[in-house]
């Protein structure tokens, strides 16, 4: 540990965010960065605890005390290498991970955890700036071919690991660009898409083959892919959104969150979307239904588009400000989360169930909602744009999954055994497709895990 008393001398200093009035005028990243000196002092706050609960909290098992120590000592390259030994893409998690590690940090007993996520992104950004992250193609190729279908963080991590292990990997993606929800779901103000392109350049230089604009199961059959490759990995996400089938659902002005967010991300990337196809919040009273990350991203996007007002409603009760007695440290704190998008101007309401949508001349004008608690008061919220952000139920079954006859579990996700194998020979599954909608960090962890299982499977034929 660099400085055993660092946590006593140095207070927590987060980098903070750009001022609201400035950031709502663009889609650039909201979060700022600290200067290197202050950031290294923040790393010195890590106590190198005998039992690093942060490590237990991190789904990719990042060696948090180790790289914070290297970082504090100024060994940026060492810190970067240590970080990459467990996490393929610290530049993504360092930006958008909800940081369960910080919830488990021993200093969080005093609600002052080490700024682990921000330290992580500082290390990897310095590493890119100093060109420590360079293509390192595998020295030996195994002669085995793997198809990874779906290029979100799970597919990217699996492809990266398998390529590094010397297999010849092709990453198939139905969209025009790689990244899955990193690219088309998560807004640019949380994750600048250049970070995905920059990482892909390294992966391609290391020998990864990329094929975009190909939906496996439609443009090419799953059977053909199985015939052509030694192993196939399904990383197709859990993209079927949860719907709200109440009266008035067919009215104009009601959209799934992903239709809305995807369109704005494409526009930011320079795509042309015809005016009559645009879903815009400009001049509209926006109602976001669903209180999670996706809903919050809709709030931030609507504010940037010039919404008159934004309301977000959630069916669950308002979480407590402080941990409840049955939710102690070191578990993830189930407390009220106020995101940067909420700070930008949004009314939030809890414990509300949506009964019906009301409209005039085919366009929605109100949502009728009811309190779920007694006495269950009803009210109508005036709105002319409703965004449904109630989560995702399971992967899309039409196409690839049904063509191959992939078995599903009780939650209708892809069923896998302890080898992460599906019921179809040489077909494996990972990420949200197998686990249900989750987080970027759990998708990366799952991608790394399936890569190891596929590697074991392929090498069992070699030796
Ligand atoms: C709006 C939004 C905001 C979020 N914000 C956060 C956040 O801040 N932090 C966080 O940790 N997590 C966040 N998440 C969750 C996170 O993005 C997902 O858990 C993660 O991306 C799942 O990774 P994945 O690789 O399993 O699947 P996905 O990212 O969904 O990728 C699946 C890919 O497979 C492709 N595909 C599907 N079928 C086929 C086919 N037949 N052929 C070819 N390609 C196919 C899809 O086009 C897609 O690109 C957010 C999710 C959403 C929707
Ligand atoms: S990946 Fe997430 S949980 Fe793991 S160290 Fe980084 S911020 Fe923490």
Image (cartoon, helix red, strand yellow):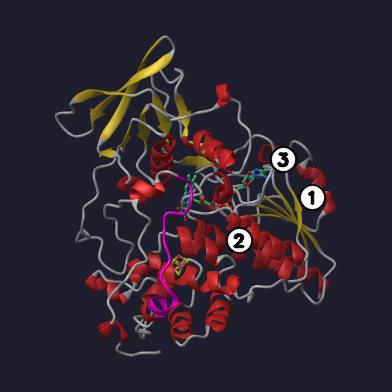
Identify which residue is drawn at 58% across, 48% down: 183
Identify which residue is drawn at 53% across, 34% down: 259
Q: Which residues are magenta?
A: 26-40
Residue ID for mark 3 = 215
SS at circle 3: loop
Query: How dense is the environment of label 3, judged by Cα within 10 Å: few (below 14), some, or many (20 and up)?
Result: some
Q: Measured along the vertical axis of the image, is residue 76 above or below residue 119?
A: below
Q: Quadrant of the N terminus?
A: bottom left
Residue positioned most to the top: 361
Residue ID for mark 1 = 226
Identify which residue is drawn at 69% across, 47% down: 173
- 163, 202: nearer the viewer: 202
First-in-chain label (1 vs 2) = 1
Residue 241: x, y in percent? 50, 36
Q: Is mark 2 within 8 Å of ligand 1?
A: yes
What is the tally of numbered marks visible in this picture? 3
Residue ID for mark 2 = 447
Q: Nearer the viewer, mark 3 or mark 1?
A: 3
Asked if residue 149 lies in the magenta stretch, the reply is: no
Query: How dense is the environment of label 1, judged by Cα within 10 Å: few (below 14), some, or many (20 and up)?
Result: some
SS at circle 1: helix
């Amino acid at each position: 540990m660099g400085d055993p008393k660092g946590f006593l001398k140095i207070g927590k200093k987060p980098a903070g965010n750009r001022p609201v009035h400035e950031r709502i005028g663009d889609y650039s990243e909201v979060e700022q960065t600290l200067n290197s000196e202050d950031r290294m002092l923040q790393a010195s706050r890590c106590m190198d605890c005998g039992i690093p609960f942060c490590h237990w909290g991190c789904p990719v098992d990042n060696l948090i005390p180790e790289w914070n120590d290297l970082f504090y000592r100024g060994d940026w390259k060492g810190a970067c290498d240590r970080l990459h030994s467990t996490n393929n893409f610290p530049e993504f998690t360092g930006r958008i991970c909800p940081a369960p590690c910080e919830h488990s940090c021993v200093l969080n007993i005093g609600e002052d955890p080490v700024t682990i996520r921000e330290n992580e992104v500082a290390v990897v950004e310095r590493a890119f700036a100093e060109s420590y992250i360079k293509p390192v193609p595998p020295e030996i190729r195994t002669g085995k071919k793997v198809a990874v279908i779906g290029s979100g963080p799970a597919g990217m991590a699996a492809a990266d690991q398998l390529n590094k292990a010397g297999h010849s990997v092709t990453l198939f993606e139905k969209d025009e660009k790689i990244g899955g929800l990193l690219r088309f779901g998560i807004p640019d103000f949380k994750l600048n898409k250049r970070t995905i392109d920059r990482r892909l350049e390294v992966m391609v230089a290391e020998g990864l083959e990329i094929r975009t604009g190909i939906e496996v199961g439609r443009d090419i059959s799953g059977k053909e892919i199985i015939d052509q490759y030694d192993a196939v990995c399904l990383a197709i996400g859990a993209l079927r959104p949860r719907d709200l089938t109440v009266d008035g659902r067919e009215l104009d002005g009601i959209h799934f969150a992903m239709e809305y967010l995807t369109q704005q991300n494409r526009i930011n990337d320079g795509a042309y979307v015809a005016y009559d196809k645009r879903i815009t919040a400009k001049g509209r009273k926006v109602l976001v239904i669903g209180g999670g990350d996706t809903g919050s991203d809709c709030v931030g996007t609507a504010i940037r588009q010039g919404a008159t007002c934004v309301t977000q409603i959630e069916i669950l009760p308002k979480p407590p400000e402080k941990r409840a007695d049955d939710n102690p440290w070191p578990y993830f704190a189930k407390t009220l989360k106020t995101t940067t998008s909420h700070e930008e101007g949004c009314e939030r309401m809890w414990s509300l169930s949506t009964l019906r949508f009301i409209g005039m001349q085919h366009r929605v004008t109100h949502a009728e909602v009811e309190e779920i608690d007694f006495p269950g008061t009803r009210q109508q919220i005036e709105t002319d744009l409703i965004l449904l952000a109630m989560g995702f139920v399971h992967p899309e079954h039409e196409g690839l999954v049904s063509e191959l006859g992939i078995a599903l579990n009780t939650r209708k996700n892809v069923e896998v055994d302890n080898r992460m194998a599906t019921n179809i020979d040489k077909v494996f599954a990972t990420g949200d497709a197998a686990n249900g909608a989750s987080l970027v960090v759990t998708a990366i962890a799952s991608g790394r895990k399936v890569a190891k299982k596929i590697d074991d499977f392929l090498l069992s034929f070699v030796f």
